[in-house]
Image (cartoon, rainbow, N blue to C red):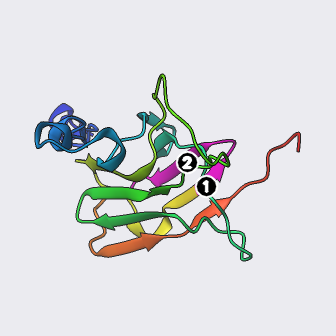
Amino acid sequence: MSAERQAKRSLKVIVVSKPFEDLARGSSLMATTWHPPTDVFECGKSYVIRMAISGLRHGPDGNIQNAQVTVEGNTLTISGFRHEHCTHEKYQFFQMEIHYGYFESHVRIDAPFDRAHIRAQYRDGFLEIIIPKAQEDTLGTHTITVEYQVAADA
């Protein structure tokens, strides 16, 4: 493979997030779209997106119900909703660092990948999306099922 072709195949990742966009418009912290911490890396024959999103729920089918992963073009969109689990009648926050409500992140991968074989798994509070590399791009829009994985020591 020529050096020029190798350079064209290199991975370019663009994580699109605008964490202060809603706050700038005057929204409260609770009402904003938040963006989970995200790692994107290359590992062997795959690209991997790993997000820290505790509190997602799974349904009777074993799949996560309050998060979605979709692919359109070269962009993966990860979105969902994390519910607040406060059981107290009245409460007042003194410090609030945990985000609740709607979250969304976009990851654009500018390298060929196999959209039809993307896998997503949720385990121990982390969503991991495994994206197989490809020689040529496969086009189309896909929705990926997020599988719930039971913790190894549970």
User: On the image, numbered disc 2 is attached to which residue?
Assistant: 127
Principal secondary structure, stretch drawn in magenta: strand
Q: Position of residue 49 (x, y in %)?
A: 45, 43
The answer to the question of whether label 1 and label 2 lie on touching residues, with beta carbons closer than 8 A, is yes
Q: Secondary structure at mark 1?
A: strand
Which residues are the magenta region?
A: 121-134
Report if residue 45 lies within the magenta region: no
Locate residue 43 relative to residue 112 in the image: left or right: right
- How many callouts does the rendering have? 2
User: On the image, numbered disc 1 is attached to which residue?
Assistant: 121
Quarter containing the N terminus: top left
For the point 19% across and 38% down, the residue is 23
Residue closer to the observer: 36 or 101: 101
Residue closer to the observer: 20 or 86: 86
Amino acid type of the residue that numbered disc 2 sits on in the rendered structure: Leu
Compared with residue 117, is residue 9 higher up or lower down, i.e. above or below? above
Compared with residue 71, is residue 5 higher up or lower down, i.e. above or below? above
Amino acid type of the residue that numbered disc 1 sits on in the rendered structure: Gln
Q: Is residue 51 visible?
A: yes
For marks 1 and 2, give the CA distance. Answer: 6 Å
Nearer the N terminus, badge 1 or badge 2?
Answer: 1
